[in-house]
Amino acid sequence: MIRAFRNLIERQLAKAQAEGQLQGLAGQGKPLPDRSGEAHVDAGLAVGMRIMAQAGVVPEEFTLKEQLAAARKGYAALTDAAARKAAMARISDLEMRYNMARDARKSFFR
């Protein structure tokens, strides 16, 4: 079974090369990127994250983490009690949303 599958793949690659479909691809003539950091990560997760990064997509979890850090920094500079209370409510909301997004990602990849 594996040998037949390998032969099928090799035939498909030879056909694509003969038709010129493998010419002019992005990264042609360049060395493969170093992905040694992904060696201990699930292959499916690594591919998904790489596709998202190449498309310029950032998971909601990372955006919320940045917003949370900015909100905490802004909170430290506040002196007015009402403003500090509103900022703390904002931080609590961001923390809840961040934890929900992180938990959703973890449960999705189980």
Image (cartoon, helix red, strand yellow):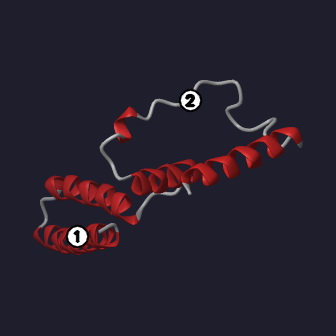
Q: Quick check: 1 above or below 16?
A: below
Does dot 2 land on a helix, a strand or a loop?
A: loop
Picture residue at 14% right of the left edge, 54% below the top: 76
| Three-letter residue code for mark 2 | Leu
The location of residue 9, given as percent across then percent down, is 67, 49
Task: Tell me where residue 47 appears, x and y as whole percent.
Answer: 48, 52
**Along the polypeptide, which appears first: circle 2 or circle 1?**
2
Q: Nearer the viewer, residue 70 or 41?
A: 41
Q: Residue 30: image x %, image y %?
A: 64, 24
The percent coordinates of residue 104 (x first, y second) are 31, 73
What number is the disc on residue 32?
2
Q: Nearer the viewer, residue 88 or 95?
A: 95
| Residue at position x 39%, y 65% in the image | 60
Residue drawn 47% across the image and 57% down it:
48
**Regarding mark 1 in the picture, which secondary structure is present there?**
helix
* Foreground pick, 84 / 88: 88
Q: Which residue is mark 1?
A: 99
Q: Nearer the viewer, residue 87 or 17?
A: 17
Q: Using residue 73 as the reference point, say whether residue 23 is left or right of it.
A: right
Quarter where residue 26 is shown: top right
106 shown above or below 7: below
